[in-house]
Structure formats: C-alpha cells, structure tokens
Image (spheres, rainbow, N blue to C red):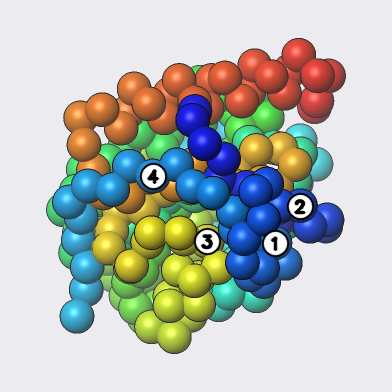
Amino acid sequence: MSGGFGMTIGRGIRCVGGRWPVGVGAVCGVVVLCLAGCKDDGDATGKSAGGGVAAVPRGEVVDLAGLQKVVAGYEGKVLYLDFWATWCVPCVKGLPELAKLQKRYGPQGFQALPISFDEPEVWDKKVELVLKRVGWEDGPALIVKDKAAQKAIEGWLGKEWDGRLPAQYVIDPSGRVVEEILGASPEKKAKLDKLIGGLVEAKSGSGGA
C-alpha cells in the first residue's frame, strides 16, 4: 500500500499523518480505489472465527455509536467491513466473497462483517434471505438504523466516501483503518485477498492470536 490511511477505532487513539479527529479515532491520509457504485436517494458459512470476540447479534440495528462499539470489540483481529444493500446489484454480486475470505483467513484471526444500508424492517424479508443465499448463513451481520446513522458512519469512516455502495474498509489488529475501497471492479477481489493475507501473515508473525 502506498500512502497512509490511519484511524484507530479501538481503545486508543492514533493518527498517521495527522488529520481530522472523528468519533473515537482519527482519519489521516487515505488510499482509495474510487470506482462506480450505487447510491440510494469463522468459515464458509460465515460463522465467527471466535478468538474471544463477544458475539455480535445477527441483524443488530446500529447507529454510529453501536458500530463503533462492535468494531472496538474486534480489536486484535483483522476486520473487513462490507457496506452493502439488497438494492445494490454490485454489492450483492460481491457478497459471496465474504464466506470465501472467512473460510481462508478466519482461523488466523480475521473477521468479515457485512453491514446493510437497507431499512431495518426488511431484515427478515430481504436482507437475511440474500445473506443466506450467498453463503453467509449465520455469521455476524448488522443493519444501519436510518439515514442519519448512515451519514454519521460515512463521516466517521470515509475520506472519499459519499454513501455510494459498495464500500469496504479493512482494519488492522490495532484498530487502524488501512484501506478504503469504494465501488466494484474486477481488480478488487485480488487486491483484497493480497491485503488481508498480508495483514493476517503479519499478525501471525507477531504472535497475535
């Protein structure tokens, strides 16, 4: 990766390069793949990898504070946040990659976490059905409370993010955002695999759980 996209979201606050404080962390320089996207006007089944992380209720409705609490709970793991919606075709098309990544890297301290921008009332009728169809059968999954919460989350996490989907964030074991990927492209799968693989390898090499 070139440049630095530093933002610590765990218990501490750390900034690389120094730029706007947000929530419990700080967003600094950014590495962004900004491509076309949508905007609304543990294993192959998606089970949690364990490792002492408190269980995240599937379908939990979160606002900014709720998401920050969940993310902080995964400190010590490599975390992949995938923001999506059932109405976003590229989002749904990319969802099967979640289970593949979880199966490959979950035992080494990795966790994928899909976060839906659908309305909470359609969880059972739409969101849950799509997640199960793509192989994320019973792993952790969240849904954002409302538009105001979506905007707050965009402001907290994103350097270039304007709410278009899909949007992905990779967070290292210290709770620092190291990559922001906006939109969908054929190169995204290979880039994510290489990035996550490198973080997991570094974590294992440092003796992390």
Q: Give the CA separation, mark 2 to mark 1.
A: 7 Å
Query: Looking at the picture, how far across and down is residue 185, in whole percent?
Result: 21, 36
Residue 157's tag is 3
- Badge 2 is on which residue? 14
Mark 2 in CB contact with mark 4 (< 8 angstroms): no
Tell me residue 68's x, y (percent).
65, 65
Q: Nearer the viewer, residue 50 or 1?
A: 1
The reply to whether callout 2 and callout 1 are in contact (CB within 8 Å) is yes
**Residue corresponding to mark 1:** 25
Instruction: Tell me the CA gap for discs 3 and 2.
Output: 14 Å
Q: Is residue 115 left or right of residue 156?
A: left
Amino acid type, label 2: Arg
The structure residue drawn at horizontal position 57% and vertical position 40%, both measured from the top left corner, is 4
Percent across and percent down for residue 153 are 50, 70
Circles 1 and 4: CB distance less than 8 Å? no
Q: Which residue is mark 4?
A: 32
Marks 2 and 4 sit apart, C-alpha to C-alpha, by 20 Å
On the question of residue 133 being in view, the answer is no
Q: Residue visible at 63% across and 23% down?
A: 200
The residue carrying pointer 2 sits among few (fewer than 14), some (14 to 19) or many (20 or more) residues within 10 Å by Cα, namely many
Which of 158 and 4 lies nearest the eye of the viewer? 4
